[in-house]
Amino acid sequence: MSTSTFVWLVVLVSIATYATRFPSLVLSRRVRVTPRLQQGLQFVPIGVFAAMVAPSVAQHALPGHTDIAFLVAVCVAFAVAFWTKNPLWPMLAGTVTAALLRLL
Amino acid sequence: MNAQTTSSRSLAASPHGVRDFAQACADAVPLTVSVFVYGMAYGALAHSANHLSVWRTLSLSCFLFAGASQFTVLSLLQQSAPLFVIVSSVFLLNARQILYGLTLGPHLRDLSWRQLVPLAHGLTDESYSVTITAAYRRPLTVAYFAGAGASVFVPWQVSTLLGYALGGFIHHPETFGLDFAYIGAFIGLLVAQWYSPRRFVAGLLSLLVAAAASRFGGTTSAVICGAVTAFLCGFTAPAADAGSVAASASPTPKHRKEGS
């Protein structure tokens, strides 16, 4: 990716993020969000995270492209995530699992 | 950085500035530790898996300053996703911070909007948790909010650089399973969100919808369809089930890992 494209990327994602931080802080003296909308917004990250996980897992499970090491790592990561409820350990455990299975 | 500049201004203005700033840092210590480890993972991945330069890696930490979003950017860059997909994903992912602003804002009535310009940049899952908890105990000051922001911002930059340095020792990411690292990180972030049955169901539905959508429209439709599915699950939930703003205000660390 060229430098100018990357600068654009950084500028746009930063503005998009700042737009979620500043206006609501300032406007919250007047605007009230309905509880229902609040609940909806609170659930959005679930959908985005799911969208980061599912397509890649599905791809590694397709007949002909099956990657057993990857799929086992997915299962290990889910198990560790349930157990620890911390985002870091599943990443480490899954990565180590994938690495070990490929070394075998 | 921004948060620190403002705090030094407010330190002069408020007699309790130093005390409040230090109190915020102390309150944030457990979160600072997890932020640091997570930041190292980001830096290492940006270097070893994405081969970004140190400046590109650090510029995201500095200006975007949102953990989960930065992982998402790395992951989408690797998939060569178009720019608007990356930007809209980041916005959707951070839309929850609009809520944080809406709940914190009423506690910050005494601050001018000029003060809020730099302070807003320090608003994260972690600093929100710390600040809203303190707000229920006593009136919020600029120094406290600045301290909460700085105690996430500073370790995030330092750990990004440290992780980047360590990532330089990794030359073949696949052999170390690092192609899996993003997925692992997002599995962790996803499961950390599953603290009610409704959220669990929302997660499973979103996984299915996103997987199906990606077959037809790639990453773009996966993100949009996944986010809409989850939004509708929350939007249609009975109030007690979904966790209200009051519930989100209680800073249980395991609930607060979705970004930095």
Image (cartoon, helix red, strand yellow):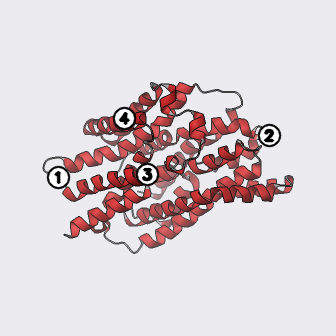
Q: Nearer the viewer, mark 4 or mark 1?
A: 4
Reply above or below: B203 against B182.
above
Q: Nearer the viewer, mark 3 or mark 2?
A: 3
Residue A22 shows up from this direction = yes
Q: Evaluate if marks 3 and 2 touch, with contact meaning CB atoms under 8 Å apart.
A: no
Callout 1 crowding tier (Cα within 10 Å): few <14, some 14–19, many ≥20: some
Q: Name the mark on residue A43.
A: none
**Distance between the Cα atoms at labels 4 and 1?**
27 Å
Q: Chain of mark 2?
A: B
Answer with the quarter of the image where residue B214 lies.
top left
For numbered disc 3, what is the local secondary structure?
A: loop
Label 4: which secondary element: helix
The disc placed on residue B110 is 2
Q: CA distance from mark 1 to mark 2?
A: 59 Å
Q: CA distance from mark 4 to mark 2?
A: 41 Å
What residue is drawn where x is 45% and y is 24%?
B236
Q: Residue at x 24, y 53 (%)?
A: A71
Left or right side of B168 for B5: right
Residue position marked by numbered label 4 in the rendering: B201
Left or right relative to A69: residue B153: right
User: Of the residues shown, which amino acid type is indicated by label 4?
Assistant: Val
Chain ID for label 4? B
Mark 1 and mark 3: span between their CA atoms? 28 Å
Kind of residue at badge 3: Lys
Mark 1 vs 3: CB contact within 8 A: no
Rendered image: mark on residue A66: 1
Q: Tell me the element at label 1.
A: loop
Q: In this figure, which residue is indicated by the disc labeled 3?
A: A85
Between A57 and B57, the one lying in front of the other is: A57
* Helix, strand or loop at mark 2: loop
Frontmost residue, A4 versus B139: B139
